[in-house]
Image (tube, rainbow, N blue to C red):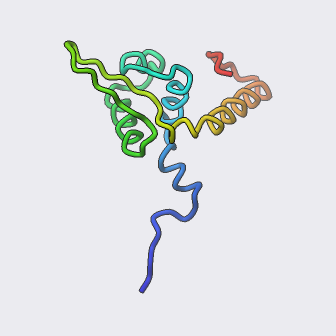
Amino acid sequence: METSTPFNCPFELTMEIIGGKWKGLILWHLHNKKVLRNGEMLRLMPRITQKMLTQQLREMEEHALVRRVIYEQVPPKVEYSLTAQGEALRPVLEMMIEWGAAYAREHDIAIGCSSA
């Protein structure tokens, strides 16, 4: 009987969970701001669509990286923050920022934010 594993290595699993165009950036903003509402994230990432932001947040919530808190009020208020599992990614995110900043300097690439 052949057993199959869904992932060939831990790196593949990690990329499945945090990979893609937006997840890392969402995680970084949540790390920096601690708590964000939907509209705040859209302002921080003007190129993301509402549909994509919702999809990415739902996936990260399913993977226990992001916590969603719904306040019963009118209008409804929803806040997002990192779980302990999401916070554990902080060193990875910081290393990615450092690497990106060094790469930009070495290749004379303009960066429009001060992130480090």
Relative to 62, residue 53 above or below? above
Residue closer to the observer: 36 or 110:
36
Task: Count every numbered label the image shows and give the total.
Answer: 0
- Residue most extreme to the bottom: 1
Report the side of 12 relative to 74 (left or right): right
Where is residue 41, by image quadrant?
top left
Q: Residue at x 77, y 24 (%)?
A: 105
Where does residue 60 sit, x and y in percent of width and height? Answer: 42, 40
Where does residue 11 sit, x and y in percent of width and height? Answer: 59, 54
- The C terminus, quarter of image: top right
Where does residue 98 sit, x and y in percent of width and height? Answer: 72, 30
Relative to 71, residue 54 above or below? below
Where is residue 54, by image quadrant?
top left
Q: Residue at x 47, y 36 (%)?
A: 83
Report the side of 2 relative to 116 (left or right): left
Q: Residue at x 37, y 44 (%)?
A: 62
- Residue most extreme to the top: 74
Where is residue 101, by image quadrant?
top right
- Residue most extreme to the left: 74
Where does residue 102 sit, x and y in percent of width and height? Answer: 76, 29
- The N terminus, quarter of image: bottom left
